[in-house]
Amino acid sequence: MTVFGTNANDREQLYWCDSRSIYDLFEQSLTAHLEHRNDKRQVLDTKQTLTSGIEDLWTDGRFIFSTIYNPKKKLVMAGYFQHMEPTPTMAMPHDMKMVGNKAKVTDKTPLDVTVEKLGQYTMLVYRNAQGAPVRAYYSITNDMRNNGEWTIFLHYILAGNYQLADGKHSVFGPKQDFYDGDRYDSDPGVFRFYIHPDENIIDIIYGEGRVSNGDPSSPKYGKMPGGGGAGAIMGPMTWQVKLTKEGLDAAVTNDEKFVDHRPRLKDGNNVLTKVQCPWQGIDGKWAFASVIPLTHELLKLFPKDVLELMRAEIYARHGDTFKSSANQKYFDQQPWYKKSGKPVVLTDIEKFNVALIKQVMATLD
């Protein structure tokens, strides 16, 4: 199942895009991410980027923000993208003043802001006095905003193969068919998601507005909306999911009874155990933390105990051992974990994610 699309806030401002284009984009990007995951971090010309006079767009994977330089006030003005109205749950970026080649926020919290290159991505990074990242935003273009490509970042943390309690597989990610193509109706759908403020519950809606092929050989043909037949408008299927240590807790909150979906989720809660990440050769349930830079908003979707394991898993992939007996026991049970006995050398992306995870965990106390 390919997941993308998001609302901007409680008012359900939605960004739509064609499922196949994002599906293909996700597949293509996996290889590129692997190729660039060992790249060195670069600090770019922050002053040139932020004072160019052009409105720059940034996303934390959930919301879009913009920055533009105001020469009269000599400030880099930061705010929500023009079509988004802030709510109390949204972490507002601050206006910044330029000090040398760094920007500094103008409120009471001393934060340096730099434009950095991490792997494939140009990032706007807020760092505290100790140099640790506390906020991070991906640079995006107007084209990415318009075609929905900016929503792919949430997709990365959900993607993978999952196993249901009955041993059958459910999928969030590439190269999997969740629809039985031999039946009467196709189900590529259009997807969007909505994150409930302060609850870390994600509504995933797909298939909304689909048009049935209306196969007359199906026994359901005459019972379909609009009297059946081609052109019948199909309703959406809605999952409500929450990220857990095992993978996902998922519940079907709405379904179109005339469509045969895969996976077949029962009514009520379904435990989806994550068994494989999409990045081949990178082990662990949270392999993305060794492949792409993360943001504070994406990390806040995970409970604190998962964030602790996610951070430890980065070290475990390098064969490190742990002072925490609980962590050591957990990784000893993972078939891919092998103690190296050598000093651990993290990549720059991993160092960034380790530091950011630590900062996010501190806000959850």
Image (tube, grey):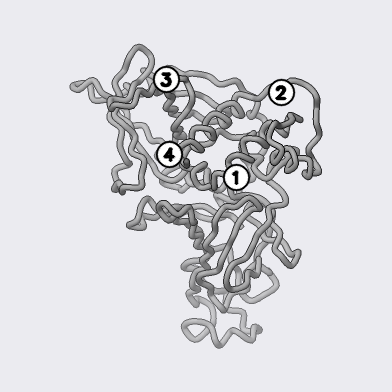
Q: Which mark is residue 59?
A: 4
Is any atom of residue 83 visible in this view?
no
Mark 2 highlights which residue? 344
Per the model, the C-alpha gap separating discs 1 and 4 is 23 Å
Query: Mark 3 or mark 1: which comes first in sequence?
Result: 3
Seen in the image, is 224 located left or right of residue 76?
right
Seen in the image, is 285 located left or right of residue 240?
right
Residue found at the very far left of the displayed protein: 72
Q: Number of labelled discs? A: 4
- Give x and y (percent) for residue 95: 29, 29
Per the model, the C-alpha gap separating discs 1 and 2 is 22 Å
**Mark 4: which secondary structure?**
strand
Mark 3 highlights which residue? 129
Q: Nearer the viewer, mark 4 or mark 3?
A: 3
Query: Mark 1 or mark 4: which comes first in sequence?
Result: 4
Q: Which residue occupies the foreground of this view, 18 or 84?
A: 84
Mark 1 highlights which residue? 306
**Residue type beneath disc 3:** Ala
- Give x and y (percent) for residue 137: 44, 34
> Residue at point 73% right, 43% down?
330
**Residue type beneath disc 4:** Thr
Query: Mark 2 or mark 4: which comes first in sequence?
Result: 4
Q: Residues within 10 Å of mark 1 (few under 14, many from 20)?
A: some
Q: Are marks 1 and 4 in contact (CB under 8 Å)?
A: no
Per the model, the C-alpha gap separating discs 3 and 1 is 27 Å
Query: Mark 1 or mark 2: which comes first in sequence?
Result: 1
- Give x and y (percent) for residue 110: 35, 23
Q: Which mark is residue 184?
A: none
